[in-house]
């Protein structure tokens, strides 16, 4: 255990369990200036720290931008989800299986962050912008998670979490007063590259340049678009983010083609919406099925047309009140009730991204612009009644 902010890269480092892969040993971490965290419990791994520092900076920026308790659920250097601490509707609470829990704002933020992609969040690294209270700790205690970073912990919360995973759960206390240096470096196969840290503000100016016939960005839409855009800053590129109701509901990351990012993000958003459908909420499962398996089974039920026959057979054996898959018309009618927003980390090269977005109830969009196809994407938005603004700010992350 190290005292917060006291270590210096010239004198001390911490040993990591191993590098990115178990055979990459020994591995260590050292701070360039002040340590931005203290290890309260457990021993970090290389990937843990990559996720922890990205998640920590994301939730701090969300907290500053939206002035709400914020949380993130990280997997493989991209957020599985991110959210602010708004209360959950009864239907959303049922889909997350938290309807019997009393959630504080910081707990609600993490439940939403994790709930944006319940399957991908399995084994995540959690982050919270505010002090972790007992409400959040009790929820985390039952989840499969590798660790958490937050600015502080109530004594009861720290006691609960320090017993998780047989006492090996990684708990980091981040220091909001320690900022990363202005210049960041990366070593890659024998070369070192330096660049200024990306600190350009994401704020209301993002809506100053609407280019569609419709131009209004209501307050809740602005909130969700700012959330989605901040999340993109900490996501592997290419990336596209769909958000609604104060949380990420679909994020497509790390694809070589932008349309594949859009398909991933919108496909996840579709599943998030359909998880709240009466027919999905009404599924009953074999009593031996654990919570993560129930979440996976609901996702498979929604994606029935994509399943192989063995997958279909297994799913039907798990559901005790099987009546058949969702009807396609019913699916589309349900999705049509929602109003979602979408943000891109770079320009859209083709209108197919807009075509895919409108099918997932997207009504407002942000993108940097700068493509030779900007007029085509604007025309597509006008065709569907989507409001779009160009920010002029690319958010690549590699």
Image: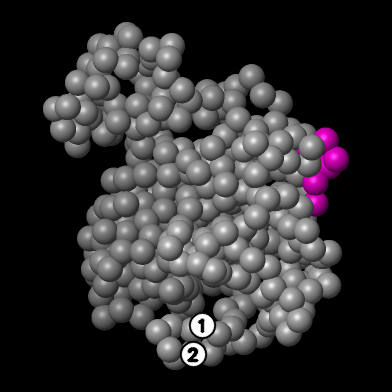
Cα distance, mark 1 to mark 2? Answer: 6 Å
- The quarter of the picture where residue 273 lies is top left
Horizontal relation, residue 22 to residue 63: left or right: left
- Residue 282 lies, with reference to residue 55, above or below; the image says above
Give residue 238's mark. Answer: none
Left or right, 235 with respect to 348, comes to right
Q: Secondary structure at mark 1?
A: strand
Q: Position of residue 383 (x, y in %)?
A: 27, 56
Q: Which residue is mark 2?
A: 192
- Tell me what residue is drawn at x 38 percent, y 14 percent: 285
Which quarter of the rendering shows the N terminus?
bottom right
Q: Which residue is mark 1?
A: 186
| Classed neighbour count for the residue bearing mark 2: other residues with Cα under 10 Å, few (<14), some (14–19), many (≥20) | few
Q: Determine if the magenta segment contains residue 155.
A: yes
Q: Which residues are magenta?
A: 152-157
Q: Are marks 1 and 2 in contact (CB under 8 Å)?
A: yes
Q: Could you say which is closer to the camera, residue 19 or residue 294?
A: 19
Q: Which residue shows up at 17% across the image and 27% down it? A: 310
């Amino acid at each position: 255990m190290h005292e917060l902010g006291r270590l210096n890269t010239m004198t001390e480092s911490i040993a990591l369990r191993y590098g990115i892969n178990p055979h990459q040993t020994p591995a260590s971490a050292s701070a360039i200036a002040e340590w931005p965290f203290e290890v309260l419990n457990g021993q970090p791994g290389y990937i843990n720290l990559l996720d922890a520092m990205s998640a920590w900076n994301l939730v701090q920026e969300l907290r500053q931008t939206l002035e709400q308790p914020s949380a993130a659920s990280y997997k493989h250097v991209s957020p599985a989800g991110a959210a602010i601490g708004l209360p959950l509707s009864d239907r959303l609470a049922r889909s997350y299986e938290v309807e019997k829990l009393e959630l504080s704002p910081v707990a609600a933020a993490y439940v939403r962050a994790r709930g944006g992609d319940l399957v991908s969040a399995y084994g995540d690294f959690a982050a919270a912008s505010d002090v972790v209270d007992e409400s959040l700790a009790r929820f985390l205690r039952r989840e499969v998670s590798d660790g958490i970073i937050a600015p502080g912990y109530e004594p009861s919360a720290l006691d609960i979490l320090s017993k998780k995973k047989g006492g090996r759960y990684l708990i980091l206390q981040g220091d909001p007063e320690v900022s990363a240096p202005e210049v960041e470096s990366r070593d890659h196969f024998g070369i070192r590259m330096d660049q200024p840290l990306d600190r350009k503000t994401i704020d209301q100016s993002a809506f100053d340049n609407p280019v569609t016939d419709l131009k209004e960005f209501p307050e809740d839409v602005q909130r969700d678009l700012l959330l989605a855009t901040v999340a993109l800053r900490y996501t592997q590129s290419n990336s596209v983010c769909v958000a609604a109701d104060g949380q990420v509901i679909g994020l497509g990351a790390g694809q070589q083609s932008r349309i594949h990012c859009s398909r991933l993000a919108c496909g996840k958003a579709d599943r998030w919406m359909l998880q709240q459908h009466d027919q999905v909420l009404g599924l009953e499962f074999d009593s031996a099925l654990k919570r993560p398996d129930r979440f996976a089974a609901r996702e498979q039920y929604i994606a029935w047309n994509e399943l192989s026959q063995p997958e279909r057979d297994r799913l039907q054996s798990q559901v005790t009140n099987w009546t058949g898959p969702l009807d396609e018309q019913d699916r589309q009618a349900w999705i049509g009730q929602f109003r979602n927003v979408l943000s891109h980390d770079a320009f859209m090269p083709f209108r197919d991204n807009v075509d895919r977005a409108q099918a997932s109830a997207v009504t407002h969009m942000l993108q940097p612009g700068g493509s030779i196809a900007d007029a085509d994407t604007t025309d597509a938005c006008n065709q569907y009644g989507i409001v779009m603004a160009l920010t002029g700010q690319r958010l690549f992350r590699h």
